[in-house]
Image (cartoon, rainbow, N blue to C red):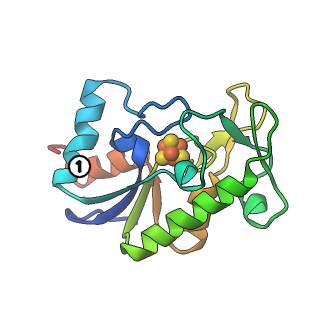
Amino acid sequence: MIKIPLGSRILISACLTGCKCNYKASAASVNAADASFWNSLFEHFRLLPVCPEQLGGMPTPRVPCELQHNSEAVLAGVGKVLNRDGADMTACFLKGAEEALRFARLHGAELVVFKSRSPSCGVSQVYDGTFSGSLIAGSGVAAQLLLQSGFALLDEIQFREKLKTQGLTEL
Ligand code: SF4
């Protein structure tokens, strides 16, 4: 079971912390209360924001991408990530995953909290590769590399639930 002591070093998707780094050049917050919650975490944890897609050299804004094979296959060199125009962006996703792992190790991250459904950061669900909004079970490329490297991962919903179960609702 994952415990989250106050002061933990948490590698976190930068878009969750208010960085306008997603494909639309927006942050992930859905409203002001949501943004305020994520900002408040900086007072209680040592947050390490990363955006694997930017670290992989992709521009912001950018054409959205989806996994065409599962992330294990992408990491093994036999799967691809394409953007909506059909361009092969696999190399950027692999580089971003490696950089996120390097950053996590460099700073001694004790937990990873990543944005759900992203082809880089998704923890338990990702889009199915058809650009139709359909979801399937799976993880993003950076999330999978961190998992395979021994890091504990939660998506943002699991993280908030975990804080509640630990009685940290006052954050
Ligand atoms: S790659 Fe991760 S951090 Fe960057 S925008 Fe996508 S979900 Fe957010």
Q: Quadrant of the C terminus?
A: top left
Image point (61%, 34%), residue name: 62
Within 10 angstroms of label 1, few (less than 14), some, or many (20 or more) residues?
some
Q: Quadrant of residue 99?
A: bottom right
Residue 91: x percent and y percent? 72, 57
Q: How many marks?
A: 1
User: Residue 37: horizontal and vertical position, in percent?
Assistant: 24, 38
5 vs 111, left or right, is: left
Q: Residue at x 57, y 47 (%)?
A: 122
Residue 129 x, y percent position in the rendering: 76, 37
Between 131 and 161, which is closer to the camera in this rendering? Answer: 131
> Residue 117 appears in which quarter of the rendering?
top right
Secondary element at tag 1: helix
Question: Which residue is disc 1 drawn over?
Answer: 41
Residue at x-position 41% and y-position 75%: 106
Q: Which of these two is toward me, 126 or 59?
A: 59
Residue drawn at the location 36% of the way across and 70% of the way down? 110
Which three-letter amino acid code belongs to the residue tagged 1?
Leu
Q: Is residue 19 visible?
A: yes
| Left or right: 115 in relation to 164 | right
